[in-house]
Image (cartoon, rainbow, N blue to C red):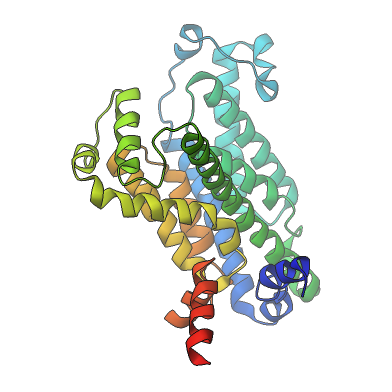
């Protein structure tokens, strides 16, 4: 077996892509995915009101706005009017998507309004990168079947497309984590080659926490403790690199969807406790896409989980085969 065949077998054979027909034959995966899409739009509606509740029109004149392409029209409309239009559009389209997400036009309008909203707050308030993944998910949801309320008229094709688009949402979110992990790995290798502190060193996690708190001039609940007790922080730091780096691999393994989602949520909670960065929208998406994954089996044994762990599962299988023979 050559390398390409092995990669195809590793990623495809046990993935939802290869077994999509099995999922389509059951009602639960499709109806779970359908419910989760509705919950996603409920969250957008909630966020449109509460996440940025104030209407502070003085922000625009006090800020040097970067008129990126989606909000370039603000140059002509003016900031107060533009903010009103964008905020109301976000609220109205989120409400429509909460009521009737089965219509593609509604999902397109919701995406456009979200794009305008994120662009505005990125330009004015430096909105957290949390919302970039929400944009990616909203864009992919446009490609769900139109009018899925009538999906029983063509169940196989429509359900298949619905589940594939939902898996695509899982994959795009997981890919952002893997890219972040790869960036950390490349940065760590660069530091090693430059003779600087390396990411695998015992104090690496503590140094990163200390640097972050100093740069942002902030404090956190466990940051100072983590710096003083770096030996306890190091396993969390190494585990984080592993989780991030192999997130995209994990999305091809339904047996570990819930485990991976749980691990990444712990990563974000740890970030909040140690360096005071919350990423609340990411936690919501991970809960929706992975903890409640429609592809994850209802019951999975710890042996199946261990076998599907990236790298570690392969090493464990080699170990078992060696001693079994």
Q: Against 71, is 319 above or below?
A: below
Q: 35 or 170: nearer the eye?
A: 170
Q: Is residue 134 left or right of residue 111?
A: left
Q: Position of residue 257 (x, y in %)?
A: 52, 67
**Residue at 45% over, 51% down:** 241
Q: Total marks drawn?
A: 0
Q: 259 or 155: nearer the eye?
A: 259
Q: Position of residue 167 (x, y in %)?
A: 65, 62
**Residue at 49% over, 69% down:** 312
Q: Is residue 216 visible?
A: no
Q: Position of residue 201 (x, y in %)?
A: 36, 45
Q: Quadrant of residue 164?
A: bottom right
Q: Residue furthest bottom?
A: 325
Q: Position of residue 114 (x, y in %)?
A: 60, 36
Q: Quadrant of residue 18?
A: bottom right
**Residue at 59% over, 77% down:** 28
Q: Against 95, is 124 above or below?
A: above
Q: Quadrant of the N terminus?
A: bottom right
Q: 107 or 191: nearer the eye?
A: 191
Q: Is residue 31 visible?
A: yes
Q: Is residue 320 left or right of residue 135?
A: left
């Amino acid at each position: 077996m050559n390398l390409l065949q092995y990669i195809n077998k590793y990623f495809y054979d046990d993935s939802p892509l290869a077994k999509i027909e099995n999922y389509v034959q059951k009602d639960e995966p499709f109806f779970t995915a359908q419910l989760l899409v509705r919950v996603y739009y409920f969250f957008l509606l909630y966020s449109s009101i509460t996440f940025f509740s104030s209407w502070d029109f003085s922000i625009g004149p006090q800020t040097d706005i970067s008129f990126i392409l989606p909000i370039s029209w603000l140059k002509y409309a003016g900031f107060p009017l533009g903010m009103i239009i964008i905020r109301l559009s976000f609220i109205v389209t989120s409400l429509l998507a909460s009521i009737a997400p089965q219509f593609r036009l509604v999902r397109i309008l919701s995406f456009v309004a979200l794009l305008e909203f994120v662009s505005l707050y990125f330009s004015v308030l430096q909105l957290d990168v949390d919302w970039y993944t929400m944009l990616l998910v909203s864009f992919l949801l446009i490609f769900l079947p139109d009018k899925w309320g009538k999906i029983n008229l063509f169940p196989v094709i429509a359900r298949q497309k619905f589940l594939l688009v939902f898996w695509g949402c899982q994959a795009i979110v997981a890919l952002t984590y893997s890219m972040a992990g790869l960036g950390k790995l490349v940065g760590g290798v660069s530091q090693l080659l430059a003779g600087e502190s390396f990411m695998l060193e015992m104090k690496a996690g503590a140094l990163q926490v200390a640097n972050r708190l100093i740069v942002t001039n902030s404090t956190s609940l466990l940051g100072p403790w983590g710096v003083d007790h770096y030996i306890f922080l190091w396993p969390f730091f190494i585990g984080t690199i592993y989780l991030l780096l192999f997130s995209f691999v994990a999305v091809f393994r339904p047996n570990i969807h819930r485990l991976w989602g749980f691990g990444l949520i712990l990563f974000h909670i740890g970030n909040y406790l140690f360096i005071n960065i919350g990423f609340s929208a990411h936690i919501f998406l991970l809960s929706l896409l992975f903890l409640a994954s429609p592809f994850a089996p209802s019951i999975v044994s710890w042996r199946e989980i261990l076998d599907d762990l990236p790298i570690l599962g392969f090493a464990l299988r080699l170990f078992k085969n060696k001693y079994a023979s």
